[in-house]
Image (cartoon, grey):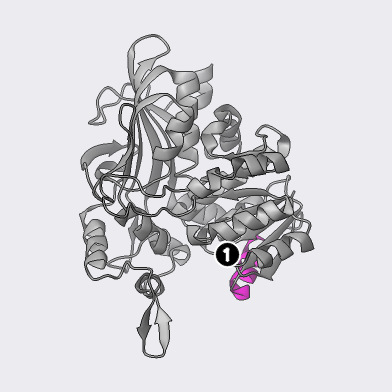
Amino acid sequence: MRILLIGAGGVGGAFAAIVARRKFVTTLIVADVNLSKAEAVARHAANAGVNIVAETVDASSQQSVASLARKYKADAIVNLCAPLFNPPIFAAAFETGCTYLDTACNLSELHPTEPYSKMGVTLGVDQFAQHEAWQERGVLALTGMGVEPGLSDVFARFASDHLFSSIDEIGVRDGSDLVVEGYAFAPTFNIWTTIEECLNPPILFERERGWFTTEPFSEPEMFMFPEGIGELQCVNVEHEEVLFIPRHIDVGRVTFKYGLGDDFIDVLKTLHKLGLDSTKKIRVGNSDISPRDLVAAALPDPAKLGDRMHGKTCAGTWVKGIGKDGLARETYLYHIIDNATTMREYGCQAVVWQTAMNPAIALELIYNGSWRGAGVFCPEAFDAVPYLDLLAEYGVPHKVQERISSSGLVLPNSGLNQELLRS
């Protein structure tokens, strides 16, 4: 497979390091507006078995992306830029007939008068609106194929198909005990995207009510994360899973909550109060710059924090309902990774690596025919079993934890992986 990677940031660098080791890849084109960054990623991922080249691209230009895709006869375009650039990259993939993957949907727009109760333009709505056009063209677009959204949605599909006969609630819960030495505030993921999803009105779903929004950081709850991370306060933020899951799974309620911590939330609230979360450009001296871009430029690059980071990060999907045996069941399906492991094996910090492995796995499933189709899809549209099998083959299997209460008490058979469940 010939893959055109758009974006040589933290996730792009981790993706390149991962796919360069997989036999299904013949050529990887690493493209970024900054050629030196693309070249650095290409050098880091260098593998004698894969042709890796670096190129310059303007991700805001459909023509620029399409030209590169044609130059290298790309089979797939993997968009690992900020979601701001989704529309032109998505359009370039359609134009050139390339399989398309991203890790986050097109950005949302707030309801003009009641943003904290009513939906505006939802995440990815423009992408899904083009489903029939992609279907007629015979090309596959897979949106939201990171870790969250992405792997969390695969977990939801697996739980629905194999663990539960009916589902009352699905809640994606993300938390970590990561510490970055030497910084009072150092986000481990793209701050531009973090501000977007945390300060926008969170989305919730209820069967009787449909989708609706609420206040940022609402419904705080304590959630017990496994393998030593411990109990963290989690709050609502805007995320695609709440929109994706009800498209394919019959469920009473869906939420997404991050374990952000009080300090992180206080910083985000302060940025908002000062207007530093704005994307509208203002005049500063002889330049026009958006406050959010300024904040991003002032903070350390998440991709370069790995050697200062310690701890684990956990992404998972908490499902409550009736099991296949007719009894009440509460299960947390999760994936956890230690920063020391990803740094040792790939030279990438844990958060970006955990995001990047998922489009790699999805592409391999598309290549071998396990996942197929034409149109615009989210991960729940596909069988979860081959995905989780390949995740284990990559050496990072998921785990399943049976719970007896939302406080996090765990039954003795916690930590079962998929293969044990199926045996």
Q: Identify the residue at image location x=61%, y=46%.
A: 360
The three-letter amino acid code for the residue at tag 1 is Ala
The part of the chain drawn in magenta is 34-45
Rendering coords of residue 234 (x, y %): 26, 44
From the viewer's perspective, tell me whether residue 186 is left or right of residue 125: left
From the viewer's perspective, tell me whether residue 157 is left or right of residue 325: right
Say above or below: 305 vs 117. Answer: below
Q: Identify the residue at image location x=21%, y=54%.
A: 262
Q: Give the structural element (helix, strand or loop) at label 1.
A: loop
Say above or below: 51 vs 184. Answer: above
* Quadrant that contains the C terminus: top right
Rendering coords of residue 9 (x, y %): 53, 64
Q: Quadrant of residue 254?
A: top left
Q: Identify the residue at image location x=53%, y=24%.
A: 419
Q: Residues within 10 Å of mark 1 (few under 14, many from 20)?
A: many
**Which residue position is annotated with label 1?**
8
Rendering coords of residue 180 (x, y %): 34, 62
| Nearer to the camera, 309 or 205 | 205
| Nearer to the camera, 352 or 240 | 240
Is residue 42 one of those drawn in magenta?
yes
Q: Identify the residue at image location x=59%, y=74%.
A: 34
Main SS of the magenta part reads helix
| Nearer to the camera, 297 or 36 | 297
Q: Does the image show residue 195?
A: yes
Is residue 164 one of those drawn in magenta?
no
Task: Name the outermost residue toward the bottom.
Answer: 286
